[in-house]
Image: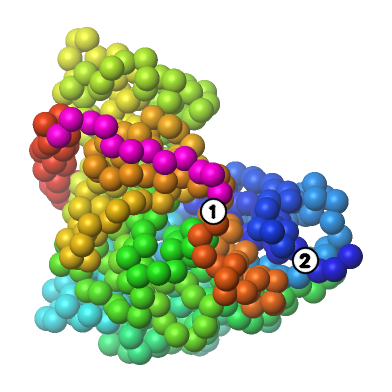
Amino acid sequence: MAKEYILALDQGTTSSRAIIFDRAKRMTASAQREFRQYYPREGWVEHDADEIFASQYAVIIEALAKSGLRTEDIAAIGITNQRETTVIWDRRTGKPVCGAIVWQCRRTADIVEELLKEPGLSDHIRQTTGLIPDAYFSATKIKWILDHIPGARQKAENGDLLFGTVDSWLIWKLTGGQVHATDRTNAARTMLYDIHKLDWDERLLRALDIPRSLLPEVRPSCGDFGQADIEGVRIPITGVAGDQQSALFGHGCIGKGEAKNTYGTGCFMLTNTGTDAVPSRSGLITTIAAGTGDEVLYALEGSVFVGGAVIQWLRDEMRFFTSSGDVEYLARKVPDSGGVIFVPAFTGMGAPYWDMYARGMLIGLTRGTRQEHIVRAAEESIAFQIADLLHAMEQDMGSPLVELKADGGACRDNFLMQFQADISDRSVYRPDTAEMTALGAAKLAGYAVGIWHDEDLHADTGKGTRFTPSMDIQQRDKALARWHEAVRRCANWAST
């Protein structure tokens, strides 16, 4: 049998997945496994990096078993991953020095505050990395580990430790410690990488006291990342991209001005800006997009920290329902939210607000408030946050976005998609497959080994579903005004 299959590893915030695609870009088999979330203190979020790898390797084997394929039938591996999450491990033993600090974790907010005291450093971060100084990114997480884990700084200065975002950790483990590398899209999320010069920035390394020897080699997203050992069979890793850039690529948004939003644990809107690194004036960030060549492509991005995670919170902590699939049914049981506004700022607010100290809030409760009203308000909160991103994106681009492409687990919710179209006053298109993140990684890997070519990278023309706005303009304006007032009231809460 010819090697005509691509294995995509989609390592997310709450689960690890493996999906096998055939030459027609159809899913042949998939497997998924959740792993534990750790909350050591308020606002802290950690993962066990060894558990991440174990879950990822397990689903590789499971997907292969389901497909009926041999390991030898896989032409290449593509990796896409949760971004910013920080792993530091011993290069000799391969053991992490502590729990992986997750992108959602806010423990390093005080380090960011200290950085902002250095004259000109905030502007340098924006101009060099395209990012806004925030605890969200990897840089301050690295510093925290070196400063707080006994012996870590000395080991790092001796060259005995390695840092990586989750892609680097998986690459290192899969190649048996032979390759310590990342791709440009993940490097661009560390707040240490110059997205114009394509190199780690010395001023930021000095400001955070991070040894350069800790950092991985940065490579283009489509190319050689070593050979993975899967049950004794060597398979080339030829595509790597952070999950949101991978989803943009998977959607076929390779033209300037094309946009997508991923509805996952968080929500992330990206617009391709081509070879122009467009600076944001509206609270967005400038980042590197995935591509197939050495030419650097850029994107504007807005990040929502809590998207689908608010539904998980209602399920796991509030016990409002046992299955996330019940959410749409509950939201439709009431005609509106009954005046309830839910701002899910559990770990602060991302774009366009960038408030590390905002905290979640339910407002507008009355004696008549029912469980269904709160569930509906939670659903609406996701769409409100995306509407804010879309407005900021259009301001920076200087032109309206005609349509928003949607993917991610929560986009299967028809109520959410329709409310998104209504509150944004833009059509929302949901492709037949919601697995755009994994497909993007597969396309990158498959292109590198000749499975696919330029004409295969454009958007797939499946049937899909298009949601068009139908809400009255006065109703929309009133709803957005109430939302923005609620956001204003939860701002800066934790700083006091």
User: Secondary structure of the magenta portion, mostly?
Assistant: loop
As shown in the figure, which amino acid type bears the numbered disc 1?
Thr
Q: Which residue is mark 1?
A: 461
Image vertical order of residue 257 relative to residue 333, above or below: below
Q: Is residue 105 visible?
A: no
Residue plotted at (71% across, 56% down):
20
Residue at 37%, 22% in the rendered image: 331
Mark 1 or 2, closer to the camera = 1
Element under disc 1? loop
The answer, for residue 240, to whether it is visible in the render is: yes
Q: Position of residue 281 (x, y in %)?
A: 15, 67
Mark number displayed over residue 4: 2
- Determine whether the residue tagged by mark 2 lies in a helix, strand or loop: loop
Side (left or right) of 234 relative to 428:
right
Q: Residue at x 63, y 51 (%)?
A: 17
Task: Residue 55 in the image: state x and y as whole percent.
Answer: 66, 52
Which image quadrant is residue 3 in? Answer: bottom right
**Measured along the vertical axis of the image, is residue 93 above or below residue 493?**
below
Q: Nearer the viewer, residue 304 or 400?
A: 400
Residues rendered magenta in the picture: 462-473
Q: Residue furthest right?
A: 1
Relative depth, front residue between 145 and 272: 272
Asked if disc 1 and disc 2 are in contact, CB closer than 8 Å, the reply is: no
Identity, as a three-letter code, of the amino acid under mark 2: Glu
Quadrant of residue 455 within the rendered picture: bottom right
Q: CA distance from mark 1 to mark 2?
A: 22 Å
Q: Quadrant of the N terminus?
A: bottom right
Q: Viewed as shown, does residue 331 lie left or right of 490? A: right
Give me the residue at 68% from left, 53% from top.
Answer: 26
Name above or below for residue 417 compared with residue 250.
above
